[in-house]
Image: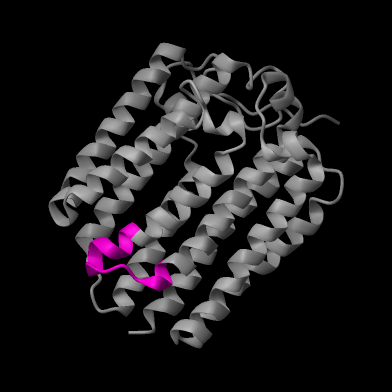
Amino acid sequence: MTTPAPKLPRPGSPGAWLLASRPKTLTAAWAPVLVGTAIAHAAGSARLDVALAAMAGASLIQIGTNFANDVFDFEKGADDADRLGPTRAVQAGLLGPRQMRAGMVVAFALALAAGAYLVAVGGWPVVAIGVASIASGVAYTGGPYPLGYNGLGDVFVMAFFGFVAVVATTWLQTGTIEPAAFVCGAGVGGLATAILAINNLRDAATDVRAGKRTIVVRFGVAAGRAEYAVMVALAAAVAPALVFGFHAPVATFASWLALVPLAAAARALYQPQTGPQMNALLARTAALLFVYSVLLSAGLALGR
């Protein structure tokens, strides 16, 4: 018995824009802000206004990047009728390429508006971070040298969804560069990269046809599976590094509770998986990234 196709929103409707924004991916934007704010709280310098502005800016950059990915992947042929992943708005005819490009511009413009408050707090470095984040979001699948098509997507995700986001969030609230933020950035960025690893494993066949040279396309399925497992292990190493290296509370180990099902997901990847099963693993990884960040943040916050 075949599974009925999901009901799609009306073309051009708010539901079509909501689908294109990929709400489930926003956990990757929220996680580093939560963790960076927890580090600032442990240092006695947490600022709710800064945290909220950073959360808004990160969310809008993520949405703008999703819009860019939707239209550029369609134009490059990576999203076609054989796609195994969730519905993409342009490929499904829910939004036109011009509409999606306009939405991308609006999302990034709103991100700049949210960032204006952070510029008032942190000065010119925030401008540099914001411009680099938006440029990388566009360049992930667009421009003359798209990062995702040249095997650099994983580097982009680790850098911006891990180190840059956590360290910048902490710095904006404390005024100092906290070494612990780099450790936490590795864990959060690692799990965000694990999400990309599943995406690349699922889309390997269509990526080959589109000339998208991901790690899986370049080095094979085994490399993609190993990448996922290594990223989960990297996230697991954060708690002991914080406890034994930075005297963080033992409660930081609570973050491991989110890693148990992720370890099970890593094992599942070594068995044949259908498209829907891969989608379920991807959604589970995104959800557990957020759980991991909440538990890690709670443990860190006790350090004050």
Q: Main secondary structure of the magenta part?
A: helix
Tell me if I can see residue 92 in this picture: no
Estimate the x, y position of residue 80 in percent, counting from the top left. Answer: 66, 18
Q: Quadrant of the N terminus?
A: top right
Q: Relative to the observer, which residue lies in front, 185 or 296?
A: 185
Estimate the x, y position of residue 112 in percent, counting from the top left. Answer: 24, 38
Tell me if I can see residue 127 in this picture: yes
Image position of 302 (left or right of 230): left
Whether the magenta-drawn stretch holds residue 171 is answered as yes
Q: Is residue 225 above or below residue 230?
A: above
Which residue is pictured at 65% across the width and 62% down the height? Answer: 232
Which residue is pictured at 46% across the width and 22% down the height? Answer: 143
Q: Relative to the observer, which residue lies in front, 15 or 273?
A: 273
Which residue is pictured at 13% across the width and 51% down the height? Answer: 120
Q: Quadrant of the C terminus?
A: bottom left
Q: Relative to the observer, which residue lies in front, 284 or 137?
A: 137
Estimate the x, y position of residue 51 in percent, counting from the top left. Answer: 28, 59
Whether the magenta-drawn stretch holds residue 256 is answered as no
In the picture, residue 46 is in which quadrant? bottom left
Q: Which residues are magenta?
A: 168-181
